[in-house]
Amino acid sequence: MTLPSTALLPFIGDIFQQMPFNQLLGLRVTDFSAERAEVRFAWSSQLVGNPVQQILHGGVIASVLDVVGGIMAVSSALLKLDSTDAALLAAKLGKMSTIDIRTDYLRPGRGREFIATAQVIRSGNKVCVCRMELHNDEGVHIALGTGTYLVG
């Protein structure tokens, strides 16, 4: 089966939404294009890192930034393909991974819902670099990140 590159975006979004860890965090891919990815998740007491202040765990924040950056990096790499068969696509996806991620925590993670976004800074044949941000439902900027991803 051959997939045209235009069919890859929903395919990639579905794959990320079906990952067990992403489901555990309650992540939903809510906006996804060749230029931008958006992931949302709701507040949950299970995601608390500081029970006194009731704020998100830093690991949750870093993980969500990594997920949205990964979605963006994978799509950037796969959209360069004219078309591919499902077996080749699965093999290529299996080799993609995070090389490095930096997370800057700007404010405590408070809110009812959180929105993580990503954009590509640079995409090459082997490596893709993305910028990610996390805001709450009131627009408060909670964290930002830069991720480097192996895509080739």
Image (cartoon, helix red, strand yellow):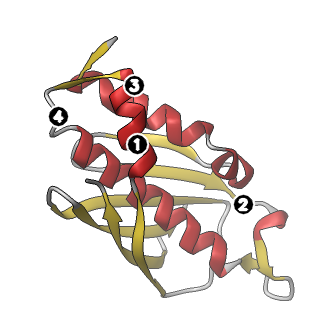
Q: Secondary structure at mark 3?
A: helix
Question: Could you tell me residue 9's position as x and y percent?
Answer: 33, 32
> Dot 1 corresponds to which residue?
93
Question: Could you tell me residue 36's position as x and y percent?
Answer: 29, 50
Q: Secondary structure at mark 2?
A: loop
Image position of 34 (left or right of 137)? left
On the question of residue 138 being in view, the answer is no
> Dot 3 corresponds to which residue?
87
Q: Of marks 3 and 2, which one's residue comes earlier in the chain?
A: 2
Q: Amino acid at mark 4?
A: Leu
Cα–Cα span, label 1 and label 3: 10 Å
Residue at the spot 62% in from the left edge and 84% down from the top edge: 108
Q: Amino acid at mark 3?
A: Ala
Assess whether mark 3 and mark 4 are in contact (beta carbons under 8 angstroms).
no
In this view, the mark in front (4 or 3)? 3
> Dot 4 corresponds to which residue?
81
Q: Of marks 2 and 1, which one's residue comes earlier in the chain?
A: 2
Q: Which mark is residue 43?
A: 2
Mark 4, other Cα within 10 Å: few <14 / some 14–19 / many ≥20: few
